Amino acid sequence: MKKKFIAIIIACLVCAEGYTQLEASNWFFGDSVLLKFSLDSIIVSKAFLSSTEATSVISDINGELLYYTNTGFVYNVLHEPIHEEPIFGYSYNPFDPSNGNNSPEWSLILNSPENPDTLFFLLTMDSTLSFTKIDRRLNDGKGGIDDSAINVLLGDTAIPMDTKLTSTRHANGRDWWIFMRSHCTAEVQFFLRWLLKPEGFEGPDYIELTDWVEEEGWQFGNMFFSQDGKQLIVLERDGFEVYDFDRCSGELEQVAIIQESFVDNFHYAALNGNGTRLYISYANYETGSIDANTGILQYNLELLPDPDAVLSSAQVVFEENYSLCGVKALKYEPITDNIYFTIVTEDSVYSHNLYLHAITAPDNLGLTCNPVEGYLQIASGPGGMRTLEGLPNMPNYALGALEGSPCDTLNETNSVAEATSLPFKAYPNPVQDYLYIDNPLQTTCQAVVYNAMGQEVASLLVQPGGQTLNTSAWSTGVYQLIIQQESDNIWKQSLIKLE
């Protein structure tokens, strides 16, 4: 495809309505690349970190850069490290910090529900999910790491995890839902879910899957929410899963599984702004593949929940010869309303790596989505800044409360929320012997536990204040705890039983 060269500062003819919060307006990725998106320009500048993949970055609500990370180090707006020793995460080599991390999405920066202007949580992955707290007030306002909160484990190290980490706002507009996925080779597949509140992290809860895209040792592909937080996409090597998501309860409902594509080896996926078009990068390099090509597929998700119709809608909208390069990461950017993608070249001049490429009309079907190779020039020659495989992992920071919903508890006029927000809790989770169930109500409730086959394994009355349940006789596995009042289900939680 013919390259279209454009200036480093380009005009973005985009409507500004709806983007009053700009925490995602700066991107850090690749070999020391920083981008700043605004309503009238994209500015390219140099970072002082590099990373093959697994970067994250956060700005303030006015779009001013705060912190960026390659998993091992966090740098501030002055491009200075805010700590001396690396935050060790999986796939990060502290002896070669310039390469950062080469796993797709194992870092994520979230602002704290308690104090979103000054406290931040860096989520990273080693044996399980962990967090490190960043305090903007330290070091005379330059920011620093809270010494009491470095690599604090949030999960179970015995459960193998995939390279998928994502987050979206709770429907109250303040808290964060955080999701990870178990490793694709595990016998039992489930999501791990946390809720980050002002009081701290709750979870993990375990959501068992009954069907999924099966893989053989492949743990790549990304997982992400739509811009409105109502859909979750999980990409695997040979297909993808689509889920509806309830931002109030944190519950997922599988809509469809799409697989058996005419191309192989999916890498990354991205949704357009309204969630109707899914774009997936691929690389056909296995025996029997078509011409060893690499490119981008488009799927029409308006055809859901019919998986066959969605599968049939697949179109190649961009393609290159795999022997020359590889299409890698894709990411939607809301200010410009573009989907950006990287192309990795292994030749000596890194010809494709000197540019960021874009789909400039992602709402359109087929080639009218207008993929543009060489859309944004990053550097003028080898040895300078360049793209690598990944793009930053960031949620939709601007997503607000789901107004009028029962869980919009921050809206003082929402009487429905006040009446139905029930802070039940069951812990520890995973459980080995005794499970403690908190009951915040002044009345007795019924608790029922079901195993993965839907069979009832326990039933008890939960008195005001709480009750203890002996689980020592349960088999290892995933269970569902349901709290009832007058035969109505008012709360539920997934549990996992360990030996």
Image: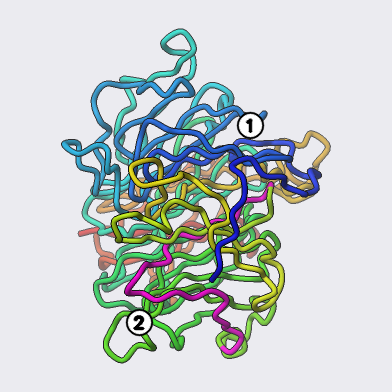
Give the labeled residue for mark 2. 292
Q: Quadrant of residue 63?
A: top right
Residue 13 in the image: above or below residue 344: above
Front one among 363 and 316: 316
Asked if the magenta segment contains residue 117, the reply would be no
Q: Is residue 455 visible?
A: no
Secondary element at image label 1: loop
In this view, the residue farthest toward the top is 140
In this view, the residue farthest toward the left is 95
Q: Which quadrant: the C terminus?
A: bottom left
Q: Which residues are magenta?
A: 312-335
Find out whether the residues at labels 2 and 1 contact each other: C-beta distance under 8 Å.
no
Q: Quadrant of residue 471?
A: bottom left
Front one among 361 and 60: 361
Give the labeled residue for mark 1. 63
Which marked residue is nearer to the observer: mark 2 or mark 1? 2
Classify residue 303 as left or right of residue 497: right
Classify residue 111 as left or right of residue 354: right
In this view, the residue farthest toward the right is 413
By secondary structure, the bulk of the magenta-drawn segment is best described as strand
Residue 346 in the image: above or below residue 114: below
